[in-house]
Image (cartoon, helix red, strand yellow):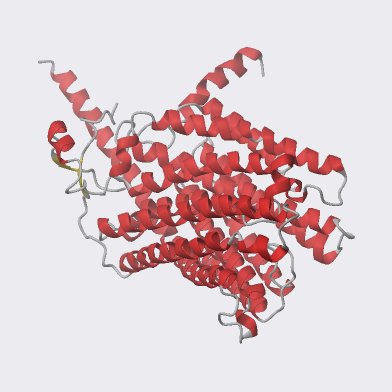
Amino acid sequence: MSFSDFFIKLKSYDQNATIIFDRDEPIGQATDLVLPDRRWFNRRARRKLGRTVEAAPERS
Amino acid sequence: MNPSATTNEEVSADVEVTTSDVERVERALIDASTRLPVLVFYTSAIAWLLLATFLGILTSFKMHAPDFLSGWAFLTWGRIRPAHLNALVYGWGSMAGMGTAIWLMARLCRTTLRHPLLLIAGAAFWNLGVLMGIGGILAGATTGYEWLEFPGFSALTLFVAYLLIMTWTLIMFRYRRRGHVYITQWYLLGAFLWFPWLYAAAQVMLFIVPVQGVMQAAVNWWFANNLLFLWFGSIGLGTVYYMIPKVIGRPVHSYYLAAIGFWTFALFSSWTGMQRLIDGPFPAWMITASIAAMILSIIPVATVGLNHHMTMRDHFPLMRYSPTLRFTVFGAIAYTAFSVVGVIISLRSMARIVHFTEASMGYTMMGLYAFFTMVMFGSMYYIVPRLVGREWRYASLIKLHFWGSTYGIGLMVLLLLVGGFVQGLSLNDPTLSFAESTESILPYLRGRTLSWILLSVSHLVFAFHFGLMLLGFGRTASVPTFLNPLESEGGGH
């Protein structure tokens, strides 16, 4: 293996870090967020954030 | 509108949907193939955890109330302590770790598990080995070597069971459908190859062709330390490398750092162990080499810790919503703390104080529980719903489990480390009698019993919740409802 091949291979290593993602669970999509928000604590912070209840994608 | 362009778009959309469907079906098939063996491993692990917890409370209680249940030989401290530790190490830790490793390996190799009954047979043999081992210890047939107390017939059963399980994992890896090998697979493969080396070497050198004199202690501590580092450490770190990126939806910060972390971990960890024998009758170079390896192990710890931290950066608020992330991040942080404490108590000046004290147990529990067990809990919260097709029933029970475990282990480690230091100072004080020096640690030992009670509550809650999942009482909603914090908390990309 030449040095250039070696460096090309080295640069491609970071692609390996994406191996655990796919179309159903892509990069940028959090999974497993199943705990509801605390009911009584941080109410002010929650109001500020103004989050909306949304459905998560199906577990897969 | 160009009709041909429209056709192409439609075709590409069709292809996308099809690929996605194929991936979904593929995952479902993999999960279905691992369902039974992984659940068998998890169920057994939790059963052993409950037994280990019960024995842990008894062991802890007897430390400050030695007359409690002392009428029965099998309940004396000298028997229930090794029974407790071996139930924790081989019953709970190893079975939970192997269950998680099998699922992760199948998912990462993208291969369905063929002939899962053979793995179930492996689990059954492993259970039999642990059962015979603990029974043997309680009956008084202990070997007396730390973490190797199981009698010979039990060790042999364990080894056969392990070969069955390891072979199946290696076969999965051999027939993987992806060329790339992910970081988690490095650690899992490492763990599955290191364990037989450690276990076989220790068995041969201690029981089959025993080395002479004090070298037995050297072999014993090399084994015990490396079981913690190379077996539990590898499975734990491999799991963290999967769970954190997967849950937050972000790739690992740096593959290069991960590679440096893995190879330095492999290089330095196997040299450790002798630091537990500081000032013992051993060649000075042996102990010094282990101390140096412990100090150098800061390199993998720092790289792994940095990698995890950078991956998690800006995503810490997600811990509020994901049980997996909570437990896993707690475990990852505990790994750093465990390693730092390990270095500190390995230094000769510190070891002279904390050697032979409860601090040693505090350090072990940091690795075995605060790091490994918490990571395993996290992985179970992720994997079990995918296996049984239902969601965890009660969020409140998950929180109770988390906080019970966190406060329990936090209190225990703090008390044992501080108590061990106080005990060491008292032991080194020539003006105090031995009885007085032992009394100095009594308040800490009572506190440890309290911490075990907290852990018991948390384990019972978890076992109950897991039982509900097994019996089909989990939430049937196919889509878990949650408060999506991605947009507002910068969790997305």
Q: Is residue B430 visible?
A: yes
Picture layout, residue B43 above or below residue B218: below
- Front residue of B293 and A55: B293
Q: Quadrant of residue B69?
A: bottom right
Please state which of residues B69 and B318 is positioned toward the viewer in this rendering.
B69
Tell me which residue sits at (16%, 37%) in the image: A46
Q: Position of residue B440 (x, y in %)?
A: 61, 59
Q: Quadrant of residue B153?
A: bottom right
Tell me what residue is drawn at x 66 percent, y 44 percent.
B345
Residue in front for this viewpoint, B262 or B282: B282
The residue located at (77%, 62%) in the rendering is B203
> As drawn, is B455 to the left or to the right of B286?
left
* Residue drawn at the location 74% of the way across and 51% of the way down: B222
Decide if residue B356 is on the left or right side of residue B31: right
Q: Is residue B101 visible?
A: no
Q: Quadrant of residue B477?
A: bottom left
User: Residue B42 placed where, x, y %?
Assistant: 45, 63
